[in-house]
Amino acid sequence: MSQSYDADRSFKWTFILEATGWVLRLLPIVAVAMFLWYYLPGYDVVRVVDTDVKRMDVKAGEQAEQGEVLNRDVRFINAVWPDGSPRVYRNEETGWGFPWYMKFDSQNLQAKAQDMRSQEKDPTWVLVTHYGWRLPIFSAFPNAINLEEVEGPAAEPLVPWINVVFIVVLLIVVLIVWRLWRWFVDRHWLPVMRRLEIERRLDDTAGLPSKTWAWLREEVSSVVEDMRARKR
């Protein structure tokens, strides 16, 4: 009974350790996938119903440490999906910073969105290129990059070429880095480790003869002392 319990317990711990190992291996992959999902362009076909500009209070730079609040205008593009559910985009410039969409024409895009407004009776469908997620709990909105009029709500790009090219290039870079790392490990790291291991073993065995001789002398001395003690 005890052996069965120990075996079952060992199996459970082995399963937990293996599952934890797989989770730790998958975490970087999931993190990279979420990162790409957020920053790579997405495409929505919606109907623009209105545009808006809201003044938002933010803290930035030294003012954040001093508790001062800065105000900035944030442009929004209000739209609806073909089924009538709302979809809201922010319209902010990315400038030269990350992500590198080099967007400097937010005001022009706002005017374009105003011109594309339509009613439900006579809809104008717009293909919105954007990045980011809509997270109401964090008041986060996807950032619109480009607007393009299309024929209908089903007119989406068949292949997102930007995403495909980026992911292919990323995989090639990862493969090259991996091959370089393996080459470094095989040509430089492992030989050094083997040399250090050999040197350590030689150091451990260098004093073996003298240690053996000392052990024999101690044994012989012990036997001689025992024989003398018996004669007495």
Image (cartoon, rainbow, N blue to C red):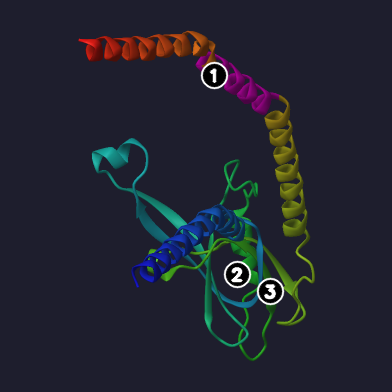
Mark 3 is on which residue type?
A: Val
* Residue nearest the viewer, comparing 89 with 204: 204
Residue at 64% x, 57% y is: 40
Dots 3, 2 in contact, CB < 8 A: no
Q: What residue is at 40 percent from the left and 9 percent from the top?
A: 217
Q: Identify the residue position indicated by label 3 in the image.
A: 126
| Start-end of magenta stretch | 188-204
Within 10 Å of disc 2 (Cα), the crowding (few <14, some 14-19, many 20+) is some
Closer to us: 67 or 6: 6
Quarter of the rendering containing residue 26: bottom right
Amino acid, disc 2? Gln
Q: Which residue is mark 2?
A: 114
Element type at mark 2 = helix
Name the residue beneath numbered marker 1: 200
Horizontal side of 219 relative to 102 (left or right) equals: left
Q: Is residue 4 left or right of residue 225?
A: right
Q: Position of residue 164 (x, y in %)?
A: 76, 58
Q: Magenta: predominant secondary structure element?
A: helix
Above or below, comparing residue 108 to residue 82 in the picture:
above
Residue 19 higher or lower than 198, as above or below: below
Q: CA distance from mark 1 to mark 2?
A: 76 Å
- 81 shown above or below 1: below
Q: What amino acid does circle 1 point to?
A: Arg
Answer whether residue 177 is magenta in the image: no
